[in-house]
Image (cartoon, rainbow, N blue to C red):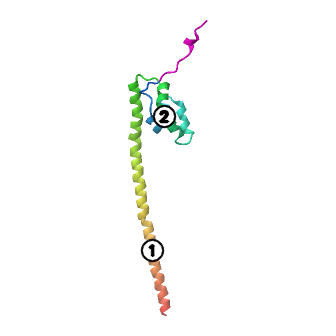
């Protein structure tokens, strides 16, 4: 009789150093999931934001550890840190540029030269109308 205990595959244990919040999973969601062979993360494309992002933040590091081959815990930590670092490198400048664009748009709307010209033209027309009315009232 074959020993059934030897044929049972054991679930890979997750070291305590690995457990914790996954900024890469939270910030990059489905992109991070593809890069870490964590295919359940593709649900981020279907589920409303931020459901899967939070789940990936909570469980992502454990899933990534189990789903991909890592040479060491340090290698895993380095790669996971790089996901968060690249999000900052890419997204902070984009957010800054977006802020500048929104601010510039608000200033241009407030200054709106076309509206100012139209307002000045309307004032001229009003003055001309008043002059015509005065000239008829004098007669």
Compare residues 100 and 44 and report the one nearer the observer.
44
In the picture of the structure, the residue carrying the numbered disc 2 is 58
Q: Which residues are magenta?
A: 1-13
Q: What residue is rendered at 40% in x and 57% in y?
A: 104
Crowding near the residue tagged with mark 1, few <14, some 14–19, many ≥20 C-alpha atoms within 10 Å: few
Q: Secondary structure at mark 2?
A: helix
Mark 1–mark 2 Cα distance, whole angstroms, equals 62 Å
Membership of 27 in magenta stretch:
no
Q: Secondary structure at mark 1?
A: helix
Compare residues 133 and 47 and report the one nearer the observer.
47
Q: Percent x, y for residue 54?
A: 50, 38
* Quarter the N terminus occupies: top right
Q: What residue is rendered at 53% in x and 30% in y?
A: 39
Task: Tell me the mark number nearer the camera, choosing from 1 and 2.
Answer: 2
Task: Choose the circle earlier in sequence order: 1 or 2.
Answer: 2
Q: Is residue 64 above or below residue 3?
A: below
Q: Is residue 6 above or below residue 128?
A: above
Residue at the limit of the structure toward the bottom, as seen here: 139
Membership of 2 in magenta stretch:
yes
Q: Percent x, y for residue 102?
A: 43, 54
- Residue 111: name its quadrant: bottom left
In the picture of the structure, the residue carrying the numbered disc 1 is 121
Helix, strand or loop: magenta stretch: loop
Residue at the limit of the structure toward the top, as seen here: 1
Q: What residue is rendered at 41% in x and 47% in y?
A: 95
Residue at the limit of the structure toward the front, as seen here: 16
Q: Relative to residue 74, is residue 68 drawn left or right?
A: right
């Amino acid at each position: 009789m074959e020993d059934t205990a030897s044929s049972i595959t054991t679930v890979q244990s997750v070291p305590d150093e690995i457990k914790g919040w996954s900024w890469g999973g939270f910030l990059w969601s489905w992109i991070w999931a593809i890069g870490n062979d964590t295919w359940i993360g593709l649900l981020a494309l279907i589920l409303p934001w931020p459901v899967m992002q939070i789940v990936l933040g909570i469980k992502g590091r454990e899933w990534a550890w189990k789903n991909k081959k890592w040479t060491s815990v340090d290698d895993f930590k380095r790669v996971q840190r790089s996901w968060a670092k690249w999000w900052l490198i890419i997204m902070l400048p984009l957010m800054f540029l977006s802020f500048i664009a929104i601010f510039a748009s608000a200033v241009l709307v407030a200054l709106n030269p076309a509206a100012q010209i139209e307002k000045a033209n309307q004032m001229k027309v009003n003055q001309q109308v008043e002059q015509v009315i005065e000239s008829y009232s004098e007669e």
